[in-house]
Amino acid sequence: MSVEKEELAAKIDTADWQALRAHLERGGVVIVDPLLDLAEVGVALAKDDVKSVERWLSSGLIAKPSAQQIQSWDAEKGKNFLCLIVSPYVLAQEESPTKG
């Protein structure tokens, strides 16, 4: 694991959906598919790795939350996400039931 990835991995935290909603209002929330490593995505964004980010965007592995997702998460009290701030974005990943 690279130093940058280790540093970002150490900054991954948990937040509930309501805490993330303020960032949603300014367009800063990016949803990361559980198939991806959250710290790896953070490194790619921080380093402006356009090729990786475009590949993930085009394959739907990272995206802005859809209206349907937002509605679902608003209705689910206590919905938690793993999150990582890579300014100006907040990367959010649904916690897998098998993790943690």
Image (cartoon, rainbow, N blue to C red):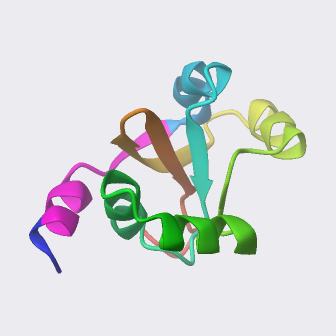
The residue at the far right in this view is 68
* Foreground pick, 81 / 50: 50
Relative to the observer, which residue lies in front, 75 or 88?
88
* Left or right: 8 in relation to 65: left
Residue 19 place in picture, x, y as percent:
52, 25
Compared across the picture, whether 11 is left or right of 68 comes to: left
User: x, y (%) of residue 6?
Assistant: 16, 66
Where does residue 4 sit, x and y in percent of width and height? 16, 63
Residue in the picture at 23% in, 49% down = 11
Q: Residue at x 53, y 35 (%)?
A: 16
Quadrant the C terminus occupies: bottom left
Examine the rendered structure and indicate whether residue 57 appears above or below residue 69.
Answer: below
Residue 14 lies in the magenta stretch: yes
The answer to whether residue 58 is above or below residue 63 is below
Residue at image location 52% in from the left, 49% down from the top: 92
Residue 58 found in image quarter = bottom right
- Between 36 and 88, the one nearer to me in the picture: 88
Residue range of the region highlighted in magenta in the rendering: 4-15
Tell me, yes or no, if residue 60 can be seen here: no
What count of labels does the image hold? Answer: 0
Q: Residue 75 sits in which quadrant?
A: top right
Looking at the picture, how far across and down is residue 3, in whole percent?
10, 68
Is residue 10 one of those drawn in magenta?
yes
Occupied quadrant, residue 34 = bottom right
